Image (spheres, rainbow, N blue to C red):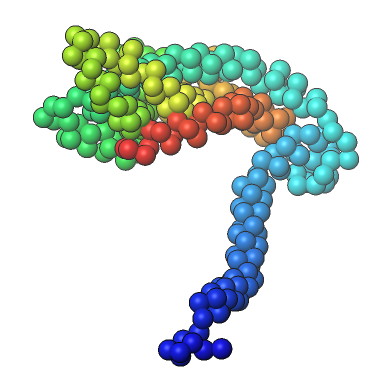
Amino acid sequence: MLTQSGAKPAHEQVAAQSAHSASKMLRRGPRRRLRAVIAAVVVVLGVIVFAAPLIIVVVTALQPEFSLIQRGPAALPEHFDLGNFAAAWTNGDLATYYRNSLLILVVKVPIGIVVASLAAYPLAKVRFRLRRPVLVVVLVGLGVPQVITLYPLLETMRHIGFGGSLWALLLPYLAFGMPFEILIMRGAFAKVPLELVEAARIDGASERFIWLRVCMPMVLPAVASLAILDGVATWNEFVIALTLLGGQSNDTLPLGILNLQGQFQTNYAQLEAGVILCILPMILLFVVARKYLTQGVASGALKS
């Protein structure tokens, strides 16, 4: 029924619009479901691709050596053999390498975070003329490849008397980790309200006091994430340690795994068991601290 002006009544217009919207949603439904299915397939394929090497390592480590030779590393074992882990720990002397890696880890990571926070605080909260050039230099440091520095590092450590020593790793590890740590900490400090910093300055607080007592407690998620990322990178580092360390007694854990590889014959079951023993602490660290990792990286990167 039309009104005098020839237009439909308001309630009919609303009903027509509702029917049109409903038909449009029905047409969109299959497309959304198709996109959801495609996304799920892509995620599953990605998980399979990234998890397959780890699954093969675990399966290999659980097989007896004779079963590994007969059936191959990708075959499911007829029975599990946990003795490979004990044999790898004993034959590879992994206790010594665990001690070395843990020692360099507990020294390097706290020093790196403190130095990075001291450098990042003025870049975020103090205005000075060279702030941008300094930040550019820090960003350039992210692009320096480690490989081109290996020979100069080796010669430098020999001249200062650290050649072959475990402590020869400390300065290179600090230098290569510093640009990323400064970038994350600068972003975290940038989110600290400037009013708090100005109020502390008005009250007569020194910059060191503001850094330690005002800013650092507010960026603890970033500190936690840096501790995790830096710890994993330090624990897994291989190339610099291979170049600078001179003896098995000073080797870190990634180098110690090489001792499970023989010159003419290798027990691959024990080798993979040693690999699992090497990566297991970092996997547990990620599982326990994943919440702090995501929060810290987000808080440090958003305003970088």
Nearer to me, 236 or 124:
124
The location of residue 81, given as percent across then percent down, is 83, 30
Report the residue that reaches farthest toward the left.
Answer: 129
Nearer to me, 185 or 19:
19
Q: Is residue 34 above or below residue 73?
A: below
* Residue 182 at least partly seen: no
Q: Quadrant of the N terminus?
A: bottom right
Nearer to me, 260 or 109:
109
The residue drawn where x is 24% and y is 14% is 200
Q: Is residue 23 above or below residue 161?
A: below
* Residue 55 at least partly seen: yes
Q: Is residue 177 above or below residue 42?
A: above
**Quarter of the image where one finds residue 143:** top left
The residue drawn where x is 39% and y is 17% is 217
**Quarter of the image where one finds residue 270:** top right
Nearer to me, 86 or 249:
86
Left or right: residue 129 compared with residue 55: left
Report the residue that reaches farthest toward the front.
Answer: 4
Badge count? 0
**Quarter of the image where one finds residue 144:** top left
Q: Quadrant of the C terminus?
A: top left
The residue drawn where x is 62% and y is 61% is 36
Report the residue that reaches farthest toward the right.
Answer: 78
Left or right: residue 155 compared with residue 66: left
The location of residue 166, given as percent across then percent down, is 45, 15
The location of residue 17, given as percent across then percent down, is 53, 76
Left or right: residue 279 compared with residue 292: right
The residue drawn where x is 60% and y is 59% is 39
The location of residue 52, given as percent across then percent down, is 67, 47
